Image (tube, helix red, strand yellow):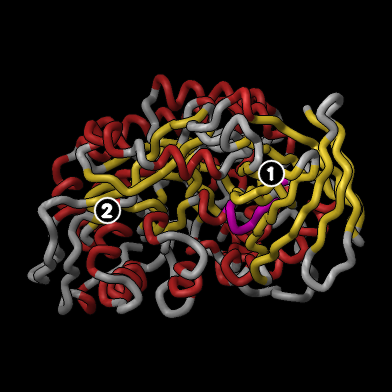
């Protein structure tokens, strides 16, 4: 049925340039698939078979949405034979591409993949992104029980990473449910949030965001329970890093790496929690049409427009400006450029004549570094040079001004109360006299710069300061370095701890 809207017409929306990152479409091939394989109410929710492009445009005008990314919702596609699944995904993508091509300034295709079939999905991702010119791809939290961090999906992730693809995640049914716990409750009410949190945590545990850093991720529904879980998970993650120093398992870093749509009832509580953990440049708008009744979508949009948790500039960023960062092709649509820079309605906002968005630039191999810069995009390159130093500090690499002849790398093994900790260390001497030095050290996955190291003969003394979830920690190290063979011995002292012995070698 087509949901009525008359009861909401009294209070028109002010922001008219929204970009929608959770806008679902139901092309004929997908509807046919649902009727054949998911009759009734998939996931305990009715299929909105009234959807058409005209319906979508009408509701976009009502909601002030200028551009919608068209993606499938749950249950998405799955067939037990890979060839059948691939043919279905191709047919759906072809129909979606035709809809987007008819109205390219309003619609963009988010392609579906025949997962969990990895090789077929990698091939379809290439076709959709290169030939169909899709804006990105859509993935569900699990595909027939295979979660997004599963190594079996690495061929797909590698393909998406090579292209710097945008990936929009949507929750779906978990592969296993608990009998008698939440029976009779539709999955979107509870299980979708658990699934989103589980999938994100799975990707952190598998270092998916580290292995494939160029993928531009959009996590649904303000991250579900991710913000609430972050501090608790981080305290347990240290045990995983102790066991395997090469693992990143960094929940906080992963949270800052991805984007979040604000679809659903995010404004009352989730938005405030999310802003404590991620920058405002990573907020995006999502309507969840046509599955959410239009009255509820209007109410959610009004809550975001009227919230005092965001400034007027932050609202423009969330509704429009941030979208131009994660999907740069949108910067070629004049209406979106204007919407990102102009105040909403008749609200007067003082500004310096420029608008700012967060744009991505590839400064290092397979690593994107971000900063807020003036637009249009062709002005970005001269503006981001200042980000190079900060980006280098996030990697275990010498500073650009360090003399390679006066720089050495060491592999140090510290005997701590919880086991042996591997600490890579860079030492960069300030001058040829070698009486002082600085550098970087990686402790439990965290890179810390240090300065004011002092050398007296072969003895080196310096402090490493690391900010842990439970507070800052300073470790003082005294090391003896053998000049002939580069071997290292010494002790490290942390507050309220006995001295810990370490050994090492020059690499």
Query: Residue 251: within the magenta?
Result: yes
For the N terminus, the quadrant is bottom left
Which of the marked residues, 2 or 1, is nearer the chain's N terminus?
1
- 323 relative to 368, above or below: below
- Within-10-Å neighbours for mark 2: few <14, some 14–19, many 20+: many
- Within-10-Å neighbours for mark 1: few <14, some 14–19, many 20+: some
Left or right, 304 with reference to 220: left
Q: Foreground mark, 2 or 1?
A: 1
Residue located beneath label 1 in the image: 207
Closer-to-camera residue (278/450): 450
Closer-to-camera residue (373/44): 373
Q: Residue at x 51, y 54 (%)?
A: 256
Quadrant of residue 192 within the rendered picture: bottom right
- 482 relative to 6, above or below: above
Closer-to-camera residue (140/357): 357
Q: Residue at x 45, y 26 (%)?
A: 128
Q: Which residues are magenta?
A: 248-254
Quadrant of residue 100 within the rendered picture: top left
Left or right, 115 with reference to 68: right
Q: Residue at x 69, y 30 (%)?
A: 408
Q: Which mark is residue 320?
A: 2
Q: Which mark is residue 3?
A: none
């Amino acid at each position: 049925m087509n949901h009525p809207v008359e009861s909401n017409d009294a209070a028109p929306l002010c922001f008219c340039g929204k970009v929608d990152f959770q806008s679902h479409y139901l092309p004929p091939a997908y509807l046919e698939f649902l009727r054949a394989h998911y009759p009734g109410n998939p996931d305990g929710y009715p299929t909105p078979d009234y959807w058409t492009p005209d319906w979508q445009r009408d509701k976009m005008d009502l909601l002030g949405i200028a551009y919608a990314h068209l993606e499938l919702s749950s249950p998405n596609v799955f067939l037990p034979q890979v060839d059948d699944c691939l043919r279905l995904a191709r047919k759906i993508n072809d129909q979606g591409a035709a809809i987007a091509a008819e109205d390219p300034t309003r619609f963009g295709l988010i392609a579906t993949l025949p997962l969990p079939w990895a090789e077929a999905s990698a091939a379809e991702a290439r076709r959709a992104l290169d030939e169909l010119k899709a804006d990105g791809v859509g993935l569900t939290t699990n595909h027939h029980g295979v979660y997004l961090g599963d190594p079996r999906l690495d061929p797909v992730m590698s393909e998406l990473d090579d292209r710097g693809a945008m990936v929009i995640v949507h929750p779906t049914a978990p592969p296993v449910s608990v009998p008698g716990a939440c029976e009779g409750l539709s999955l979107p009410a509870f299980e979708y949030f658990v699934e989103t949190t589980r999938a994100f945590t799975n990707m952190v545990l598998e270092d998916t965001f580290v292995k494939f850093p160029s993928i531009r991720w959009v996590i649904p529904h303000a991250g579900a329970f991710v913000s609430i879980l972050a501090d608790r998970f981080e305290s347990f993650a240290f045990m995983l890093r102790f066991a395997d120093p090469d693992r990143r398992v960094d929940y906080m870093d992963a949270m800052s790496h991805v984007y979040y749509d604000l679809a659903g009832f995010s404004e009352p509580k989730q938005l405030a929690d999310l802003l404590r953990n991620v920058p405002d440049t990573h907020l995006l708008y999502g309507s969840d049409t046509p599955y959410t009744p239009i009255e509820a979508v209007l109410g959610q949009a009004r809550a975001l427009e009227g919230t005092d948790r965001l400034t007027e500039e932050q609202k423009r960023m969330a509704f429009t400006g941030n979208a131009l960062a994660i999907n740069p092709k949108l910067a070629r649509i004049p209406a979106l450029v204007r919407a990102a820079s102009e105040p909403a309605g008749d609200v007067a906002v003082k500004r310096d004549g420029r608008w700012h968005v967060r744009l991505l630039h590839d400064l290092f191999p397979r690593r994107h570094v971000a900063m807020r810069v003036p637009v249009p995009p062709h002005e970005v390159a001269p503006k981001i040079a200042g980000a190079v130093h900060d980006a280098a500090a996030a990697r275990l690499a010498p500073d650009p001004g360090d003399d390679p002849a006066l720089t050495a790398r060491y592999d140090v093994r510290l005997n701590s109360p919880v086991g042996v900790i591997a600490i890579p260390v860079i030492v960069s001497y300030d001058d040829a006299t070698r009486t002082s030095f600085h550098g970087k050290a990686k402790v439990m996955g965290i890179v810390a710069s240090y300065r004011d190291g002092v050398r007296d003969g072969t003895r080196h003394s310096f402090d490493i300061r690391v900010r842990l979830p439970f507070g800052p920690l300073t470790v003082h190290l005294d090391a003896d370095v053998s000049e002939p063979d580069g071997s290292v011995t010494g002790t490290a002292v942390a507050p309220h701890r006995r001295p810990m012995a370490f050994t090492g070698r020059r690499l």
